């Protein structure tokens, strides 16, 4: 018995090595495979690119967050411009990649989701791509090239630092790469930054010593060139108090809340003062909280 145990113990290290090699081989094989079954693309309107082991896969979003365009208050000009650009795209006419930039909570992402809600039955599809997935943009484009649908690659909340590979890939995809962008693919991106990259005060100064760049303007032009590759750039700004209260009233009516106008106004302004400021997001959060509190109070009183 002792000899058998010794034999087993002597074999275990070799067995572990074989398992590690097999696992490594399987990982390498999986890294070379991009999964995007046609039936998956046929059956859903929204997808998410999931990066893994050096490549990725298109994963269907079974319950996409669709936004009703009537909820978008105070951004009429932005809606009109994005809607027109999308209709051109759907009809096979020339259309532009779009950068939606500006203050947080002002409706940038909601606008793109509302576009999907309006035109999904016209063949529009949405593919969400995180920053880490931008290095696979060309792979994704090749997968969608021959599809009959029209795809918006949605890059939400983008921001870059210098020399990031994702920045280079996005720049090449927008314009200037060796590979073309298919006619049925556009990029819609949102960012809090107008130029997607940080701008430094020192870039506007003349060289002070040997370590400074000789032509600082060229560094600035390099950063600005990325946002310039978006043919349509839509700006979003903080909303006025009147617009904020209008959004609050809209959501309150939509939820069927019976609250006196003065009470609703006062509570909404107090909520905004204790939050990050006035925005459509803050208005929605206030009404959601108010609806929850009123329902809880009614339930408690009924007990």
Image: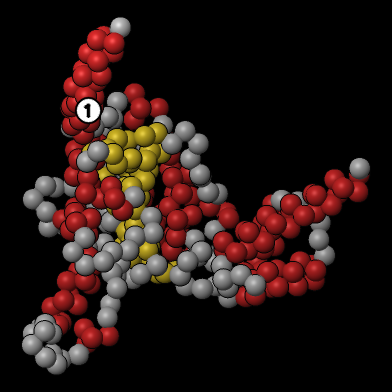
Q: Position of residue 255 (x, y in %)?
A: 71, 51
Q: Position of residue 252 (x, y in %)?
A: 71, 57
Q: Position of residue 87 (x, y in %)?
A: 36, 49
Q: Residue at x 68, y 55 (%)?
A: 288
Q: Quadrant of residue 262?
A: bottom right
Q: Residue at x 27, y 81 (%)?
A: 200
Display colour scheme: secondary structure
Q: In the figure, 169 relative to 29: above or below? A: below
Q: Quadrant of residue 269?
A: bottom right
**In what element is the residue under mark 1?**
helix
Which corner quadrant holds the C terminus? top right
In the figure, is residue 68 to the left or right of 127? right
Which corner quadrant holds the N terminus? top left
Q: In the figure, 252 relative to 142: above or below? A: below
Give the residue number, with chain letter if any, for mark 1.
20
Q: Quadrant of residue 98?
A: bottom left
Q: In the figure, 191 relative to 42: above or below? A: below
- Considering every residue shown, the one lying at the far top of the view is 1
Task: Residue 182: tell me if it is visible.
Answer: no
Task: Tell which of 146 and 197 is nearer to you.
Answer: 197
Q: Residue at x 85, y 45 (%)?
A: 299
In the figure, is residue 124 to the left or right of 144? right
């Amino acid at each position: 018995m002792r000899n058998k145990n010794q034999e087993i113990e002597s074999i275990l290290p070799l067995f572990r090595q074989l398992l590690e090699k097999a696992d490594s081989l399987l990982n390498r094989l999986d890294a070379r495979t991009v999964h995007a079954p046609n039936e998956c693309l046929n059956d859903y309107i929204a997808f998410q690119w999931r990066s893994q082991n050096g490549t990725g896969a298109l994963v269907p979003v079974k319950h996409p967050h669709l936004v009703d365009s009537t909820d978008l208050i105070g951004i009429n000009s932005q809606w009109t411009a994005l809607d027109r650009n999308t209709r051109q795209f759907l009809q096979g006419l020339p259309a532009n990649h779009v950068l939606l930039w500006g203050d947080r909570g002002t409706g940038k992402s909601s606008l793109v989701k509302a576009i999907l809600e309006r035109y999904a039955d016209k063949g529009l599809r949405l593919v969400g791509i995180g920053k880490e997935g931008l290095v696979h943009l060309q792979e994704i484009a090749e997968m969608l090239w021959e599809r009959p649908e029209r795809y918006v690659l949605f890059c939400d909340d983008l921001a870059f630092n210098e020399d990031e590979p994702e920045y280079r890939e996005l720049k090449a995809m927008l314009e200037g790469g060796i590979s073309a962008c298919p006619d049925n693919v556009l990029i819609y991106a949102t960012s809090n930054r107008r130029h997607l990259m940080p701008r430094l005060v020192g870039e506007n100064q003349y060289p002070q010593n040997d370590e400074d760049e000789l032509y600082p303007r060229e560094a600035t032009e390099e950063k600005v060139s990325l946002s310039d590759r978006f043919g349509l750039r839509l700006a979003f700004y903080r909303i006025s108090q009147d617009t904020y209260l209008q959004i609050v009233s809209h959501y309150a009516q939509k939820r069927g809340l019976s609250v006196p106008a003065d009470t609703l106004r006062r509570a909404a302004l107090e909520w905004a003062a204790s939050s990050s400021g006035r925005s459509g997001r803050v208005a929605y959060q206030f009404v959601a909280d108010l609806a929850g509190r009123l329902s809880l109070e009614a339930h408690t009183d009924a007990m």
